[in-house]
Amino acid sequence: MRRLSWFNTVSLTLGFAFLYIPMLILIVYSFNGGKLVTVWAGFSTKWYGELFRNEAFLDAAWVTLKVAVMSSTVATVLGTMAAYVMVRAGRFHGRTLFSGMIYAPLVMPEVITGLSLLLLFIAIGLDRGVLTIVLAHTTFSMCYVSVVVSSRLVTFDQSLEEAALDLGCTGFEAFRLVTLPIIAPAVISGWLLAFTLSLDDLVIASFTSGPSSTTLPIKIFSAVRLGVSPEINALSTIMITLVAVGVIGASLTSKRSIAKRAKDEQEAIQ
């Protein structure tokens, strides 16, 4: 096995330190007993209690989760349909325009997307709220789902669908019973990506949200402008912990699945 050179080792160490040391400092100071986030005043968990009693943060978190679930679900359905058309429909009139409209949000600045959607909602008289945020997040996250799913459909063996059609399945039944289970990992990955993008979005949500539909990133940004409070450190620590647990759980599940598949293949060979 090839060893890393000293230059690569130092570069990796400095890179990971730059990324993760600030997070570790934030986690440590979330247990600070004092109000000043840069002065250690003893170990305490009171700010976590204050956080769970803060109605504004709790309401913003609920709005964020609700928007993320709805927008990622709609984006996954539309993105999967768009990917299927792009891969399976072949050449058709308007294909270039269709693909350009799908992939435009990938390269479009979020400020332009948010402003355009805001002007659209004002023009049609739609009041800003949870619905407008869901529509906006669906618009810009659908393209990511389409890219992920289409990359799986390109390598999909179409003879499996043809065999299902020969056995009497309709086109929809062949897709539901054969294609969808095979591309399910890509569809799930697209949903998780859209969910993450919705949770993290600040710019587009700031254009399309209303007074009663403040998302958590907007709430955190507004609070940080007045000064970082220990409650924000506690909230950030909880979010980091949830993400870490999710990543570790997904890695362990994937590793067990690969090990089980390898074991089954070995038993089949024997």
Image (cartoon, helix red, strand yellow):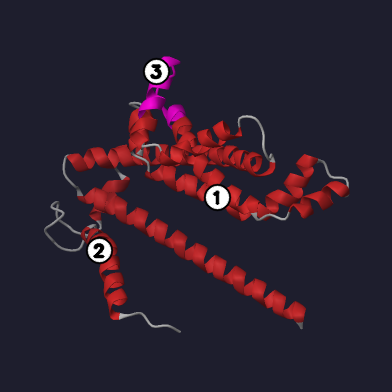
Secondary structure mainly formed by the magenta segment: helix
Q: Is residue 122 magenta?
A: yes
Give the position of the C terminus as an image quadrant. Answer: bottom right
In the picture, measured across the screen, residue 67 lies left or right of residue 167, that is left
Rendering coords of residue 30 (x, y %) = 24, 57
User: Which-is-in-front pick, marks 1 and 2?
Assistant: 1
Looking at the rendering, the stretch of residues picked out in magenta corresponds to 115-133
At a point 78% along the width and 41% down the height, the residue shown is 171
Of 66 and 107, which appears nearest the observer?
107
Give the quarter of the image for residue 5.
bottom left
* Residue receiving disc 1: 148
In the picture as drawn, the residue positioned furthest to the right comes out as 167
* Amino acid type, residue under disc 2 in the picture: Phe
Is disc 3 surrounded by few (<14), some (14 to 19) or many (20+) residues within 10 Å? few
The circle drawn on residue 18 is 2
* Amino acid type, residue under disc 3 in the picture: Ile
The circle drawn on residue 39 is none
Of 233 and 265, which appears nearest the observer?
265
Q: CA distance from mark 1 to mark 2?
A: 30 Å
Q: CA distance from mark 3 to mark 1?
A: 32 Å
Rendering coords of residue 143 (x, y %) = 51, 41
Q: Assess whether mark 2 and mark 1 are in contact (beta carbons under 8 angstroms).
A: no
Sequence-wise first label, 3 or 2: 2
Rendering coords of residue 170 (x, y %) = 82, 41
Q: CA distance from mark 3 to mark 2?
A: 43 Å
At a point 13% along the width and 61% down the height, the residue shown is 40
In the picture, measured across the screen, residue 20 lies left or right of residue 270, that is left
In the picture, measured across the screen, residue 247 lies left or right of residue 46, that is right
Is disc 2 surrounded by few (<14), some (14 to 19) or many (20+) residues within 10 Å? few
Rendering coords of residue 111 (x, y %) = 33, 33
SS at mark 3 in the image: helix
* Residue receiving disc 3: 122
